[in-house]
Image (cartoon, coloured by chain):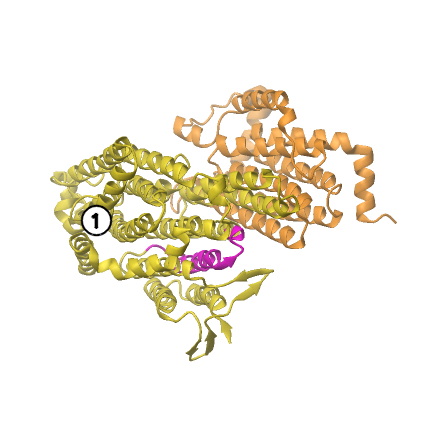
Amino acid sequence: MLNLQELFDIINFVLGLPTALLVVAAAAVLVAAQDWRLLLATLMVQTAGLSVLASRVMPAEWATIHIVVVGLIAIMWFLSARTVIKYARPRRSLWRRFAEIGTWARGGWRALRQRPRAAISPSLWFAQGLRPSFRVLVVIIVAVAAYAERFLFVLPGLPSDLSGLIVWVLIMATLGFALSDDPLRVGLALISGLSAFRLFYLALAPSTLAVGLLDGLSILAGLACSYLMVARGATAWPRQGEPP
Amino acid sequence: MTPFPLFIVTLPIVAAALVYVVRRLEAVAALVAAATAAFLAAAIATWPPVGMAVLPGGSIALGTSWVALGQNFALDAAARPALVLIFGVAAGAFVAAVIFPQGRTFAPAGLLVLSGFAAALLVHPLFMAPVILAATAAVAVFLAQGGRAGPIRGALRQMLFPFLAFPFFLLAAWYLEQAPFNPDDPLPLQTAGRLFVWGFFFLLGGAPLHGAMPALLAESPPLAGVLLVLCNNAATLTLLIRFPEAYPWLTGQVDAEMWLLGLGVLTALWGGAAALGQRGFGRLLGYAAVHDYGAILLGLSMQGPLGVSTTLTMMLARSLSLLLGASALSALRARMGSDSFARVRGAATRLPWVTAGLLVAGLGLAGWPLTAGFGARWGLLRLLMEGQPLVVAGLFAISAAGVVLGYVRGVASLIGRIPHEEAETNPVEREPARAVAWMVVFIVVAVVVALAPQVTAPWITAALDALTGVAAS
């Protein structure tokens, strides 16, 4: 029976490069993507990838703890986002839903797609974040710049491939902070940056106290962002007595 | 016997649990919180450094430290002034919350946050303080948001910068540990110095990272925002003063005077310029506070006891002005439903003392004569003119003019007549008597501090005694 360290070693040996590439892609997707479900799934993918790679420089148990911590945070955020959406969406009666199915049956997919979109004021649009196309453009520009300066990305106490990876995740986290004021996006950037810093710091100064402190801070930040997501989303809930 | 640092950290947590139970009775909760904070402020200020204090529930060992999670928590002389200020300001804010309700979460969350700031000021080694400040900032989100649905920018931004800062301190500490292994190599100390500077850059929250301050005062319950701003300022500035004592080599690696001067001028200018164009009293108070914070950073850049005493005086005046401003802002929002210039037209006729409170607070933050901030500002201007090129003092004076003009615009919107139809359909109630009493007391205190700054001298001298050795080094 394999123990945790042996399992992570085998994954590192067989899938080391693909895992690193997956983390690079996930960090970019966290900045560029729009859909909150995709963002949460990507955060978990990035955390799992980082934890697998982290087992090269720290005990596998410490790496696994981080997956559990970020998993808890992702569950908190998922529940917050679901709560916001559940109460913000206008409630539709059963007959109205049947009528929509009838519309779909008559006009097909095209008719459903051509429904008028809800108008969004420019300020609201800006507050909700920049458009994905612009985010992708920024990520590409930053990626090119980072690739050109990749020889500068040397961190003490880490192998060169992990150094580059950590710096890339930190750069993407910084972009995440810079491009949005939305608690989910800022929270994603924060947890992502903390994960990268945790890997770096525990490789430099391994201690159980540091594991506890950094994971504790991650949970606190996750909880705070979760609360802010509901506080912000609740403005979209219909008030009592207000027609949906 | 309970070690004093453990008592300081845990008493607010225990009180928070108690206050949470009675949170629906907002006035009772605020009074219990105020009593707790006032008791701690008085205890820290008056109890001797060593010995024993006997309380009904047990005795407290005053000179002993407390070890938790491998960290040592001890009450240094240098931490006392900041702790007294933090708990004193909190006591004032909680009493004000009895008159101007701030929401049910204010008292319990405020006490929890106080415990975090106290722990950050007590911890040794000092590089662990930013980690505790980051944890405190995450808890402070609940205080800043105050259980309201709505804008979250203030709460989010105040959390963000401590989280960005603490990794720099942890890495700097690691580099410091490496330095003895190769004493001839200056690189670890240089790197540690640079990392400390970056850490403080994020932690201090000067321009251009000042975004939390105006957002907090514009969007959060005003007293909660002010409590957070003042506690954060006191904790981070004390850390900044104590670091050279803990790491004496730092003064050789970093030109602290230069970068504090630059940061102070930029922050004061930014605050002044932005205050000029605001359209609401909340954000205006926020930018006035940013400008005043720039002045405090300028004061700190004047190394030595004179600079520290100027900073302490400004910090005291800032606390008075911000508490008065937050109280007036709470009253204005409660009566008018908003603090935007367009919505408060004519309010001065119905709320004259609130108007006076807003004006005295704002002008105090700009250092206007006959307000709390005047004496310290005058001293700072003199120091700047003696020690720096004249252009620094000139830029600083221009930025203060921006804040004053911002308030002139604001007060111009308050003065005048309430539109006729509004006066008939939705008459504005007059300010309640206890709110008037609160404003009058604060305004009188501000004027007394301006006319006779020597009344604050005992506190300033005591605080300076605690800090002078540090500053002189």
Position of A49 relative to A61 (above/below): above
Identity of the residue drawn at 11% across and 40% down? B417
Identity of the residue drawn at 45% across and 65% down? B8
* Three-letter residue code for mark 1: Gly
Using the image as rendered, state which of residue A222 and residue B264 is in the foreground: B264
On the question of residue A119 being in view, the answer is yes
Using the image as rendered, state which of residue B422 and residue B434 is in the foreground: B434
**Which hue belongs to chain B?**
yellow
Q: Chain of mark 1?
A: B
- Give percent across and percent down for residue A223: 54, 49
Q: Quadrant of residue B295?
A: top left
Residue that carries the numbered disc 1 in the rendered image: B375
Chain that is orange in the image = A
Position of A94 relative to B54 (above/below): above
Identity of the residue drawn at 53% across and 30% down? A175
What secondary structure characterizes most of the magenta part? helix
Taking A243 as reference, is B282 left or right? left
Using the image as rendered, state which of residue B443 and residue B222 is in the foreground: B443
Position of B113 relative to B195 (above/below): below
Q: Which residues are magenta?
A: B102-129
Position of A89 relative to A105 (above/below): below
Total numbered circles: 1
Taking B48 as reference, is A178 left or right? right
Q: Quadrant of residue B435?
A: bottom left
On the question of residue B147 being in view, the answer is no
Identity of the residue drawn at 83% across and 39% down? A10
- Give percent across and percent down for residue A196: 63, 39
The residue most toward the right is: A1
